[in-house]
Image (cartoon, rainbow, N blue to C red):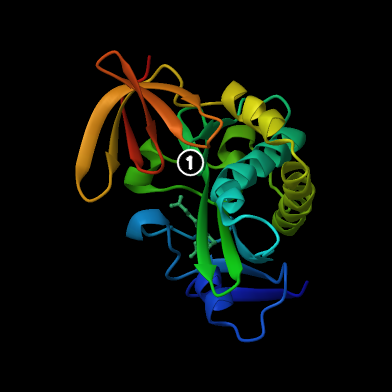
Amino acid sequence: MRIFKFKEIDSTNKFLKEMKEKEDYDTAIAETQVMGRGRRGNKWSSEKGGAYFSFLLKEDKNIAFEEYMKLPLVIGYSLLKTFESIEPELNFMFKWTNDIYIFDKKISGILVEKSEDYFIIGIGINLNNEIKGEAENTAVSMGKITLKEYKIEEIIISVIENFKKDLAFYFNGNWDKILFELNEKNYLLGKDLCIEYGSGKKETGKGLNIHRSGQLEIEISGEKKLFNAGEIHITKNN
Ligand code: BTN
């Protein structure tokens, strides 16, 4: 595991993607990103004070590829556990498939990409950064809530170390335990929501549990339906 540190970079995910001779758990950390990328082509605002990092995970060919489909959920679990250990009094929630929320605002997001035999796991955490303008309606930083100043690198390292343990736990047959805890913190449970999926399809319904398959269960016109992926908009915060 090598650590590459940058004061400024376009995107830590892009850096690792383009890097030749990759090694498992190589990590890129940046103080700021000028082209921070979010999911679905969104921009990830990367002002100084936040944690912006990516690391590599080599695909193990002895493990069925489907097992890796739940990777974003396992990473979400590691983030929850890390945040809870830093601030045990705060009620962090997991928003399927990739986000951590607190007080109805996003504190952290995950972008998983694939390049050759490697998964590139990119994480942004709002820590000491100030959230400005419109974004204040949807995002919050840990420092804003607690008025503390966090040690960014220490937190990054503990997320990665926790993830290593959690991944081994997951591959050793403990998915049900991880899933149970994610469902305890399921931000979408009982909320009226609209899911956009595929190319331009939309459905509205009520959020239920995250299913064993890793899919989200939504009740639509009295019927339960499972979704693999999609962008969720909450229409009513029941
Ligand atoms: C999302 O919520 O849409 C995912 C956001 C992921 C942002 C992180 S910041 C570090 C890494 N580099 C990027 O360009 N994106 C990820």
**Vertically, is 191 above or below 12?**
above
The residue nearer to you, when weighing 10 against 204, is 204
Q: Quadrant of the C terminus?
A: top left
Q: Amino acid at mark 1?
A: Thr
Disc 1 element: loop
Q: Is residue 139 left or right of residue 152?
A: left
The residue nearer to you, when weighing 24 against 29, is 24
Reading the image, the residue beneath label 1 is: 97
Report which quarter residue 225 is drawn in: top left
Q: Position of residue 191 (x, y in %)?
A: 38, 20
Report which quarter residue 64 is drawn in: bottom right
Q: Residue at 31% x, 26% y: name it.
A: 193
Q: Residue at 74% x, 35% y: name it.
A: 174
Q: Residue at 68% x, 56% y: name it.
A: 63
Q: Residues within 10 Å of mark 1 (few under 14, many from 20)?
A: many
**Vertically, is 67 above or below 191?**
below
Q: Position of residue 111 (x, y in %)?
A: 50, 56
**Vertically, is 235 above or below 4?**
above
Q: Position of residue 112 (x, y in %)?
A: 52, 58
